[in-house]
């Protein structure tokens, strides 16, 4: 599947509404008529980024500028600079004489990303525990119940969505925008490895106790316990990623998750 078809199916509604998905018919500009606006560089960045996040563009897949231009109704210049921006984010790489492609993150780098994420996210769960309100506690306890139900039902996608909700909830509670920005970029770079982790057999049942421990510590208002629980979870993630790499276990499905 080419980039044109992939990007045309992107769920970034605003970008797609501006770009459209049909092949345009170019006509010479005439007096009194305003040509259709080209998608901005920022919108192209967001559209391609979301396609990578959602697994529509996979590691190693070529990013052909002409196809992206057609899919998003964007100028060649905006597409080129957008790919440069994504290269700086670590999502895209350029190969000599072959152009741009979605970056492949090796296992060693992925493990380093988890380690850095653990340090930053530990700060967030500790702050969340310090700042928790009665309303936050009710929300987290409800999410804990949802996690348990999804794990028992074997609902992999539902479980992944709920872990994302837990993650987003304690980030909001922490009120640390710089940490949230850093975590968003780290999660993006590790997308493929997180997919593999989520779709490993019985992964939900294995990770559930770690998530419940994190939630319980935050609800108890215990920053040290929350940080310790988060670190234990991250260490288990690293160990599982190594095991997956050794077994080279395949996976299925492309639903975003929090890890």
Image: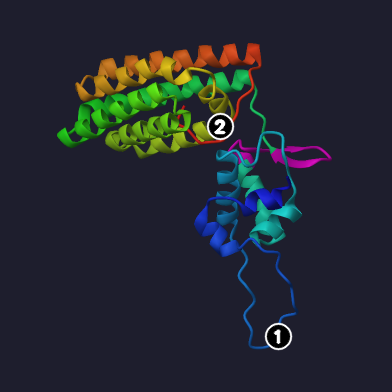
Residue at 68%, 51% (x, y): give it: 5
Q: How many marks?
A: 2
Q: Nearer the viewer, mark 2 or mark 1?
A: 2
Q: Secondary structure at mark 2?
A: helix
Query: Which residue occupies the extreme right position in the image?
Result: 97
What is the x, y in percent for residue 32? 63, 88
- The region drawn magenta spans 87-101
Camera-side residue: 13 or 189?
A: 13
Please tell me how crowded label 2 is: few (under 14), some (14-19), or many (20+) other residues with Cα within 10 Å.
many
> 82 above or below 149?
below
Q: Is residue 39 left or right of residue 139?
A: right
Q: Which quadrant holds the N terminus?
A: top right
> 207 above or below 143?
above
Camera-side residue: 166 or 250?
A: 250
Q: Is residue 19 left or right of residue 168?
A: right
Query: Which residue occupies the extreme left position in the image?
Result: 134
Please tell me how crowded label 1 is: few (under 14), some (14-19), or many (20+) other residues with Cα within 10 Å.
few
> 228 above or below 18?
above
Residue beneath label 2, please? Answer: 191
Camera-side residue: 238 or 56?
A: 56
Residue at 58%, 11% (x, y): give it: 243
Q: Please say whether residue 6 is visible from this viewpoint.
A: yes
What is the x, y in percent for residue 259? 47, 26
Residue beneath label 1, please? Answer: 30
What is the x, y in percent for residue 99? 78, 43
Q: Is residue 176 magenta?
A: no
Q: Is residue 66 left or right of residue 224?
A: right
Q: Secondary structure at mark 1?
A: loop
Residue 85, numbered circle: none
What is the x, y in percent for residue 151? 40, 23
């Amino acid at each position: 599947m080419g980039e044109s078809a992939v990007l045309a199916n992107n769920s970034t509604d605003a970008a797609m509404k501006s770009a459209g998905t049909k092949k345009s018919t170019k006509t010479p500009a005439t007096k009194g008529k305003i040509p259709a606006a080209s998608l901005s560089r920022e919108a192209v960045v967001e559209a391609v980024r979301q396609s990578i996040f959602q697994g529509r563009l996979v590691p190693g897949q070529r990013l052909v500028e002409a196809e992206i231009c057609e899919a998003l109704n964007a100028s060649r210049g905006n597409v080129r600079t957008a790919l440069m921006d994504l290269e700086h984010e670590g999502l895209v790489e350029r190969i000599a004489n072959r152009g741009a492609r979605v970056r492949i993150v090796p296992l060693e780098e992925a493990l380093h990303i988890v380690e850095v994420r653990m340090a930053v996210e530990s700060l967030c769960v500790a702050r969340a525990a310090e700042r928790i309100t009665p309303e936050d506690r009710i929300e987290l306890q409800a999410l804990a119940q949802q996690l348990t139900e999804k794990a028992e039902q074997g609902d992999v996608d539902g479980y992944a969505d709920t872990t994302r909700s837990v993650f987003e909830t304690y980030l909001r509670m922490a009120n640390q925008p710089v940490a949230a920005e850093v975590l968003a970029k780290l999660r993006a770079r590790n997308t493929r490895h997180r997919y593999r982790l989520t779709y490993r057999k019985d992964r939900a049942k294995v990770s559930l106790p770690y998530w419940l421990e994190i939630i319980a510590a935050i609800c108890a208002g215990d920053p040290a316990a929350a940080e310790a629980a988060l670190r234990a979870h991250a260490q288990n993630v690293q160990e599982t990623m190594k095991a997956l790499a050794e077994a080279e276990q395949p996976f299925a499905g492309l639903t975003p998750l929090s890890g």
